[in-house]
Amino acid sequence: MTTICPRCQKTISTQAIKCPHCGNILKAYGHPGMTLHQATQETYLCESCTYHEDDTCTFPQRPFAKSCILYQDKLQKPEQPIILPLNRRIKNWCDRNRGLLLLIVLLLMGLILTFIS
């Protein structure tokens, strides 16, 4: 697969860490899985970023960032969250709160034993 370098506009591999033509860094921290979003020469990323629009961005270069790993285009549709069935949500909640459930069971057993005696 190929993409276009934002600096020199030449075709490069999507796995390239830096552009072989101009040396522009394309992946954050040299890691192939972290895409470094970059603005063109005359614009800033913040102008079209969702995080800038809703004021949740904490990036120090805001609002003049030319590159960012958290950039999310506000014109793209946000991904819909996966809605799990009720039984799966209950199971997940029980798995996360196992200690709380144990305390509740112990408390109920203590109350039952108190009323029986």
Image: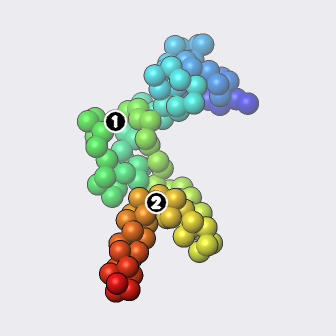
**In the displayed structure image, the side of residue 27 where residue 16 appears, left or right:** right
| Viewer-proximal residue among 10 and 117 | 117
Q: Quadrant of the C terminus?
A: bottom left
Q: Position of residue 44 (x, y in %)?
A: 37, 39
Q: Position of residue 57 (x, y in %)?
A: 31, 47
Alpha-carbon distance for marks 1 and 2?
A: 44 Å
Q: Residue furthest front?
A: 117
| As drawn, 91 above or below 57 | below
Q: In the rendered structure, are the residues bearing label 1 and label 2 in contact, judged by CB atoms less than 8 Å apart? A: no
| Viewer-proximal residue among 78 and 104 | 104
Mark 1 surroundings: few (<14), some (14-19) or many (≥20) residues within 10 A? some
Precedes in sequence: disc 1 or disc 2? 1
Mark 2 surroundings: few (<14), some (14-19) or many (≥20) residues within 10 A? few
User: What residue sits 48% from the left and 50% below the top?
Assistant: 73
**In the displayed structure image, the side of residue 51 where residue 93 appears, left or right:** right
| Viewer-proximal residue among 107 and 16 | 107
User: What residue sits 62% from the left and 29% below the top?
Assistant: 4
| Viewer-proximal residue among 30 and 89 | 89
Label 2 sits on what residue type? Arg
Q: Residue furthest right?
A: 1
| As drawn, 24 above or below 34 | above
List the residue tagged with mark 2.
98
List the residue tagged with mark 1.
65
Q: Which of the 4 image quadrants contains residue 70?
A: top left
Q: Which of the 4 image quadrants contains residue 105?
A: bottom left
